[in-house]
Amino acid sequence: MILYRNLPIKRKLMLIGLVTNGVAVILLSVIFGVGEWLEQRSRAVTTIAVHAGIIADNAAPALMFSDEKAANEVLARLGRETTIVHAVLQNTFGEVVARFHRPVRNKVVPSLPAADEHLFFSDQLVYAKNVVHAGETVGILYLQSDLQDLYWTMWRQLLLIAAAMAVALALALFLFTRLQKSISDPIDSLVAAMTH
């Protein structure tokens, strides 16, 4: 505080302006970043829930008739969806009827969610969906999605936010150095006149 008190008025004005703008820019960046983070996670859950609904509808007859071949064919279609790394279809007794996995990116998750729920694990999202046929639950589907692509997208967006923040602060510094003279020069003249 003593250092601030001894600063010339030009520096005080510049410091006040920069701190005020800096806090505002940082606060807005954090709010935007957190909002974007939550939106991306929500979008990932919605996407996996839609996939799960379609797969569960297609797999219901196979589970109803315990047709492992048909169930595996349904899950094999996940090969086109690059973010899905693991899927399991279980009947009502908890027995695995079909399984799909992408070995390169598949990770074991510590626990499974309840039906129609999701769980996030570091870079994985797991979703569980009841498989229903004619109003009767015939099994459950577990889908595991890899979130690495989502996180890379988030990092790129956060870097853009940081770059925008740096540009905004640099612009504020430039403007304050130019505009502070219009306030500090008359005050300096007044002080000089009073001291003579």
Image: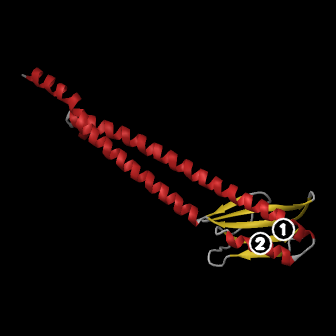
Q: Is residue 168 left or right of residue 140?
A: left
Q: Residue at x 32, y 36 (%)?
A: 17
Mark closest to the chain's N terminus, 1 or 2: 1
Q: Residue at x 79, y 71 (%)?
A: 74
Specify the quadrant of the image occupied by residue 128: bottom right
Check disc 2 and report the residue beneath it. 75
Q: Helix, strand, or loop for circle 1?
A: helix
- Residue 155's label in the rendered image is none
Going by the numbered disc 1, the residue's amino acid type is Ala
Q: Nearer the viewer, residue 195 or 109?
A: 109
Q: Would residue 113 be seen by someone viewing this image from the given angle?
A: no
Residue 106 point in image, percent of width and height = 65, 74
Going by the numbered disc 2, the residue's amino acid type is Leu
Q: Would residue 10 be seen by someone viewing this image from the given angle?
A: yes
Q: Quadrant of the N terminus?
A: top left
Count of number-bearing discs:
2
Residue 146 point in image, percent of width and height = 63, 67
Location of residue 37 with respect to 69 vertically, above or below: above
Q: Quadrant of the C terminus?
A: top left
Q: Is residue 42 left or right of residue 165?
A: right
Q: Is residue 181 left or right of residue 49?
A: left
Q: Are marks 1 and 2 in contact (CB under 8 Å)?
A: yes
Q: Residue at x 89, y 68 (%)?
A: 61
Q: Nearer the viewer, residue 73 or 192?
A: 73
Residue 95 point in image, percent of width and height = 86, 74
Marks 1 and 2, how far apart in space?
Answer: 8 Å
Q: Helix, strand, or loop for circle 2?
A: helix
Residue 39 point in image, percent of width and height = 60, 51
- Residue 59's label in the rendered image is 1
Q: Is residue 99 left or right of residue 9?
A: right
Crowding at mark 2 (Cα within 10 Å: few <14, some 14-19, many 20+): many
